[in-house]
Image: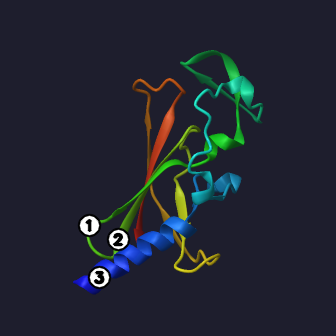
Amino acid sequence: MMQVMKLQCILLLLIFLFVTINSRPSKDRSITALKNLFMRDLKWKPSDHPGVREKRQSSWWDEETTIDPEDFTPQQIHLSLGDDASEMVVMFATVADGSDPPIVRYGISPNNYSLEAQGGSEEFYNGNSRGVHNHHRVKLHV
Protein backbone atom coordinates (compact mmCIF):
# COMPACT_ATOMS: atom_id res chain seq x y z
CA MET A 1 0.00 0.00 0.00
CA MET A 2 2.83 2.38 0.87
CA GLN A 3 4.56 1.70 -2.47
CA VAL A 4 1.34 2.47 -4.35
CA MET A 5 1.05 5.80 -2.51
CA LYS A 6 4.69 6.62 -3.24
CA LEU A 7 4.17 5.78 -6.92
CA GLN A 8 1.05 7.97 -7.03
CA CYS A 9 2.92 10.89 -5.45
CA ILE A 10 5.83 10.53 -7.86
CA LEU A 11 3.51 10.30 -10.86
CA LEU A 12 1.52 13.29 -9.63
CA LEU A 13 4.70 15.37 -9.36
CA LEU A 14 6.01 14.22 -12.73
CA ILE A 15 2.73 14.88 -14.48
CA PHE A 16 2.46 18.29 -12.82
CA LEU A 17 5.97 19.22 -13.89
CA PHE A 18 5.94 17.78 -17.39
CA VAL A 19 2.32 17.81 -18.54
CA THR A 20 1.64 19.46 -21.84
CA ILE A 21 -1.91 20.54 -22.39
CA ASN A 22 -3.38 21.13 -25.79
CA SER A 23 -6.93 22.39 -25.48
CA ARG A 24 -7.31 23.01 -29.24
CA PRO A 25 -5.59 20.21 -31.17
CA SER A 26 -6.73 21.54 -34.55
CA LYS A 27 -4.86 24.80 -33.88
CA ASP A 28 -1.79 22.91 -32.60
CA ARG A 29 -1.55 25.04 -29.46
CA SER A 30 0.53 22.87 -27.17
CA ILE A 31 1.28 24.80 -24.01
CA THR A 32 3.35 23.80 -21.02
CA ALA A 33 1.04 23.89 -18.02
CA LEU A 34 3.60 24.84 -15.39
CA LYS A 35 4.79 27.87 -17.36
CA ASN A 36 1.26 29.20 -17.76
CA LEU A 37 -0.30 28.71 -14.33
CA PHE A 38 -0.64 32.42 -13.56
CA MET A 39 -0.60 34.12 -16.98
CA ARG A 40 -3.86 36.07 -16.74
CA ASP A 41 -4.11 39.73 -15.78
CA LEU A 42 -7.18 40.30 -13.61
CA LYS A 43 -7.95 43.53 -15.47
CA TRP A 44 -7.92 41.87 -18.88
CA LYS A 45 -10.06 43.49 -21.56
CA PRO A 46 -10.51 42.38 -25.16
CA SER A 47 -8.97 45.62 -26.43
CA ASP A 48 -5.77 44.89 -24.46
CA HIS A 49 -4.88 41.90 -26.60
CA PRO A 50 -5.57 42.25 -30.32
CA GLY A 51 -5.11 38.66 -31.35
CA VAL A 52 -6.37 36.14 -33.82
CA ARG A 53 -9.09 37.51 -36.09
CA GLU A 54 -11.75 35.14 -34.84
CA LYS A 55 -14.89 37.03 -33.88
CA ARG A 56 -17.07 36.19 -30.94
CA GLN A 57 -19.96 37.92 -29.19
CA SER A 58 -20.03 37.91 -25.42
CA SER A 59 -22.45 39.16 -22.79
CA TRP A 60 -19.84 41.02 -20.75
CA TRP A 61 -18.90 43.46 -23.51
CA ASP A 62 -21.09 44.84 -26.25
CA GLU A 63 -18.71 44.99 -29.19
CA GLU A 64 -17.43 42.28 -31.50
CA THR A 65 -13.98 41.28 -30.33
CA THR A 66 -11.07 39.17 -31.41
CA ILE A 67 -9.93 36.10 -29.53
CA ASP A 68 -6.39 36.26 -28.31
CA PRO A 69 -4.22 33.13 -28.59
CA GLU A 70 -3.78 33.40 -24.81
CA ASP A 71 -7.49 32.57 -24.49
CA PHE A 72 -6.45 28.96 -25.13
CA THR A 73 -3.91 29.03 -22.28
CA PRO A 74 -4.90 26.54 -19.55
CA GLN A 75 -5.67 28.22 -16.23
CA GLN A 76 -6.60 26.94 -12.75
CA ILE A 77 -4.98 23.55 -13.33
CA HIS A 78 -6.01 20.87 -10.82
CA LEU A 79 -4.64 17.35 -10.50
CA SER A 80 -6.41 14.66 -8.49
CA LEU A 81 -6.41 10.91 -8.10
CA GLY A 82 -8.95 8.95 -10.12
CA ASP A 83 -11.23 6.10 -9.12
CA ASP A 84 -8.28 3.76 -8.56
CA ALA A 85 -4.48 3.88 -8.26
CA SER A 86 -3.96 3.75 -12.03
CA GLU A 87 -5.99 6.90 -12.82
CA MET A 88 -5.33 10.61 -12.47
CA VAL A 89 -7.68 13.47 -13.39
CA VAL A 90 -6.52 16.79 -14.86
CA MET A 91 -8.98 19.70 -14.75
CA PHE A 92 -8.34 23.18 -16.14
CA ALA A 93 -10.17 26.23 -17.49
CA THR A 94 -9.78 28.31 -20.65
CA VAL A 95 -11.41 31.55 -21.78
CA ALA A 96 -11.95 30.35 -25.37
CA ASP A 97 -14.66 27.86 -26.21
CA GLY A 98 -14.21 24.14 -25.96
CA SER A 99 -15.48 23.23 -29.41
CA ASP A 100 -12.65 20.73 -29.83
CA PRO A 101 -12.22 18.08 -27.12
CA PRO A 102 -9.32 18.80 -24.75
CA ILE A 103 -6.24 16.64 -25.13
CA VAL A 104 -3.55 16.20 -22.49
CA ARG A 105 -0.16 14.86 -23.53
CA TYR A 106 1.87 13.45 -20.67
CA GLY A 107 4.78 11.20 -19.82
CA ILE A 108 6.98 10.03 -16.98
CA SER A 109 10.23 11.63 -18.16
CA PRO A 110 11.14 15.17 -19.23
CA ASN A 111 10.35 16.05 -22.87
CA ASN A 112 8.91 12.60 -23.55
CA TYR A 113 5.13 13.04 -23.78
CA SER A 114 4.37 9.72 -25.40
CA LEU A 115 0.96 9.25 -23.76
CA GLU A 116 -2.19 11.13 -24.70
CA ALA A 117 -5.71 11.31 -23.27
CA GLN A 118 -8.84 13.08 -24.48
CA GLY A 119 -11.58 14.47 -22.23
CA GLY A 120 -14.67 16.64 -22.18
CA SER A 121 -15.57 20.31 -21.68
CA GLU A 122 -18.36 22.37 -20.11
CA GLU A 123 -19.16 26.09 -20.39
CA PHE A 124 -20.25 28.20 -17.45
CA TYR A 125 -21.44 31.79 -17.24
CA ASN A 126 -22.50 32.24 -13.60
CA GLY A 127 -21.09 35.48 -12.16
CA ASN A 128 -18.04 35.38 -14.36
CA SER A 129 -17.04 39.01 -14.95
CA ARG A 130 -14.27 38.11 -17.44
CA GLY A 131 -16.42 36.25 -19.92
CA VAL A 132 -17.20 32.65 -20.65
CA HIS A 133 -14.89 30.11 -19.10
CA ASN A 134 -14.72 26.53 -20.22
CA HIS A 135 -13.89 23.77 -17.80
CA HIS A 136 -12.08 20.76 -19.19
CA ARG A 137 -11.65 17.36 -17.56
CA VAL A 138 -9.32 14.63 -18.79
CA LYS A 139 -8.77 11.25 -17.13
CA LEU A 140 -5.22 9.88 -17.45
CA HIS A 141 -4.38 6.20 -17.13
CA VAL A 142 -0.95 5.55 -15.67
In this view, 2 is above or below 73: below
Q: Quadrant of the C terminus?
A: bottom left
- Which residue is tagged 1? 83
Would you say 64 lies left or right of 115 here?
Answer: right
Say what secondary structure mark 2 lies in.
Answer: strand
Say what secondary structure mark 1 lies in.
Answer: loop
Which amino acid type is marked by label 1?
Asp
How much space separates mark 1 and mark 2, taking CA atoms? 6 Å
Question: Which residue lies most toward the bottom here?
Answer: 3
Residue at 59% x, 74% y is 113
How many neighbours does mark 3 have within 10 angstroms: few (below 14), some (14-19), or many (20 or more)?
few
How many neighbours does mark 2 have within 10 angstroms: few (below 14), some (14-19), or many (20 or more)?
some
Residues tagged 1 and 2 counted as in contact (Cβ below 8 A): yes
Say what secondary structure mark 3 lies in.
Answer: helix
Q: Nearer the viewer, residue 77 or 84?
A: 77
Disc with the residue nearer the chain's start (3 vs 1): 3
User: What is the tally of numbered marks visible in this picture?
Assistant: 3
Residue at 39% x, 26% y is 126
- Label disc, if present, on residue 87 of the rendered structure: 2
- Which residue is tagged 3? 4
In this view, 50 is above or below 21: above
How many neighbours does mark 1 have within 10 angstroms: few (below 14), some (14-19), or many (20 or more)?
few
In this view, 20 is above or below 112: above
